[in-house]
Image (cartoon, rainbow, N blue to C red):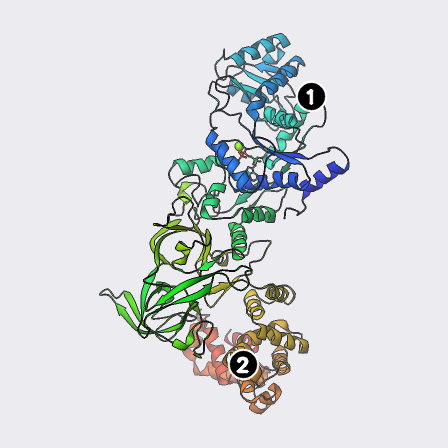
Amino acid sequence: MNESKNFLRTIVEEDLKSGKYKEIVTRFPPEPNGFPHIGHAKSIFINFGIAKDYNGHCNLRMDDTNPTKEDTKYVEALKDAVEWLGYEWDKSVRFTSDYFPQIHDYAIQLIKMGKAYVDSLSEEEIREYRGTVTEAGKRSKYAQRSVEENLDLFERMKKGEFKEGEHILRAKIDMSAANMKMRDPLMYRIRHVEHFRTGDEWAVYPMYDFAHCLSDYIEGVTHSICTLEFENNRDIYNWVLDTLELTPPRPYQHEFARLGINYTVMSKRKLLELVEGGQVSGWDDPRLPTIAGYRRKGYTPESIITFCDSVGIAKANSMVDVAQLEFCIRDDLNTKVPRVMCVLDPIKVTIENYEGSESIDASYYPEDVPKEGIRALPFSREIYIERDDFNENPPKGYFRLTPEQPVRLKHAYIISCKEVIKDTNGKTVEIIAEYSPASKSGSDTSGIKVKSAIQWVSAAEAKEVEVRLYDRLFSVEAPQGVEDINPDSLKIIKNALIEPAVISERPDERFQFERQGYFYADPVDYTTQKPVFNKIVGLKDSYSKKKKATPVKTQEKKVQIDGEVVAMSEKQQVLFDKYTSELKLNSEVANTLARDENLSSFYEQTLVELNSPVNLANIVTNEVAREIKETSVDTLKFTAKQIAELVKMIDDKTISNKIAKQVFEEMAKSGENPEKIVEAKGLVQISDPAKISPIIDEIIAKNPDNVAKFKAGNKKLLGFFVGQVLKATGGKANPQVVNKLVAEKLK
Ligand code: ATP
Ligand code: MG
């Protein structure tokens, strides 16, 4: 990992090569005024990552120059975060406050050099005197003070003789500098507050611009990496170090773009508001973008690091789609965690013809996860399934249990619905089912076809658990404040039912609940008596469909099939990539092909015959696939070559897509060549306008009402006329030609 090259690494490499530095020293310098967030993770990843990869070291430094907001609890949170992400800081944690005496000495030195002065203007005057971007500033009359007077005043400031704001120490640089930051920047201010480490030892505190560069220098930092908003501060950084004529090596500042993520706020100030306002349960609320929040939710450090790496390091700020982070955790857990069954919204199923009970050995891991482990699944007459997995009035494409459609109980038997029991309100309370004894998973001889397998738990042995389902904290992409909070960001299910091994064996902390998503045993509230699981992430991105595709570096490769999400093997992924990128198939078609060896090999054979990947894929994934499912590859009546011939006729417009299906049905039955079928049945597409025109005229004559409505503005009726013409020609008329002619005639 970490080896992706970026401009910062290029700089580091050049500096090592030129001998500018012998060792690379970086630092992560947070202000301990809040919990670190995912943006800090990026900074940690960059600073610690670079130090590690170039055999240098990275310091963890608390930038504690603002005593009003800082606290040791934040210091602990920062240490935790760095450690959890897998990094080690050099020696002990450092504090800018440890350097207060040295920084103070440097200030004295600048005063003596005539490069700093005590100003006594009010805050407002200072602002006024600074000028504007287009107007030079005006220097304060106090800049005339002698070195002695400045030394005396500064000493008395330090001792606490003055009120806050009465005096301030400024660098004497240039009041007309184009960079406004260089207009005599503030170096020290008076603060009568307890510092959490130095107590009331100091009444003056250095400003960031003065303390940061000097702390870097004191620590021997070589590359001071910070975010873009400090770009204009770089001139001060250099001015301080240059003016003091410090002995080399000295650090240089380099800026990179901040990480921003949609659907959340990121700054510590805004996060603090949410914590203090009670919108969340604390800094580690799983809905917050804090490292503690992700950790509590169940994210792994690896997934966060992969994410930081995948977003890259740029010089321009940008917003990263949170889906990219979700992809990283899903991808990480996919290869690691046990698969278990949990029913979130249970409905009872009584299997009438089942007697007694049994124990089914089921692997915790799917075949493509290189891990082993088996648990016993108790099975009995009374089970629970997900309420959602049964539907009395199923929509089209519903693959689970219905009164007519059997379903497989994952790892167990196929059941079918016999009776639905309802309460007085018409709500289904129980399903009476029957199982097929010959259908046991792994030794199924029942011959029953099902379209999906669903999760279930045995009623007697299942354990009750609390499940916390987290959604995005904000409902808009760029939230402004509490008004944008998603009211449904947390849903607590008090009595979900889980298979017993999860609790008794506790094979892991993180699980995939089959078909539900990834879950984590809450590190704080979980007890064996009252287990609590947090939802880490769903099995697929449920948001991206609604939005335009976002530039995500790595492509999601897990797709849902028959209600189940399974990862692709390496071989399948290679095919999938080839189909989508080379052959330009849409991902659904590519997915269907890649996952089915029979289909993909058939498809490859058709490609040898004809270079028409998209149309071939269409016929193969629809028609050929259905035929294979109904019979088998070995008994197909048609060959790949014949399918290619069929598609060629579509390509040359000899037949329409619709007719092609008709021809295919005939091929599947008789094995006849498609040209023969088309010829024999007179199915050749009619594209000649002279032949189509009279048919259209006839239809127009027969439907005066609709013609009038069309002319009055009901343009939808165009479809009616086209449909009538196609019907009249038995589907042989070329739809494009018909469309054009109808439109012309009705004008
Ligand atoms: P916030 O605005 O969230 O309070 P900050 O910049 O004040 O953040 P610091 O504690 O001063 O936070 O930052 C420590 C380091 O982390 C700095 O070097 C800063 O540049 C970096 N950092 C802070 N936020 C981000 C971010 N969103 N992306 C990348 N780096 C960040
Ligand atoms: Mg800050």
Of residues 185 and 250, the one nearer the viewer is 250
Q: Secondary structure at mark 2?
A: loop
399 to the left or right of 37? left
Whole-percent x, y for residue 307 in the image = 57, 48
Of residues 186 and 301, the one nearer the viewer is 301
97 to the left or right of 73? right
Q: Which residue is mark 1?
A: 243
What amino acid is at disc 2?
Ser
Dot 1: few (<14), some (14–19), or many (≥20) neighbours within 10 Å? few
What amino acid is at disc 1?
Thr
Q: Is mark 2 within 8 Å of ligand 1?
A: no
Whole-percent x, y for residue 394 in the image = 37, 70
Q: Secondary structure at mark 1?
A: helix
Of residues 61 and 397, the one nearer the viewer is 61
Q: Which residue is mark 2?
A: 632
Dot 2: few (<14), some (14–19), or many (≥20) neighbours within 10 Å? few
Of residues 248 and 229, the one nearer the viewer is 248
Q: Earlier in the sequence, mark 1 or mark 2?
A: 1
Answer whether residue 355 is visible to the viewer in this image: yes
Q: Quadrant of residue 368?
A: bottom right
Instruction: Give me the C-alpha separation between circle 1 and circle 2.
Output: 83 Å
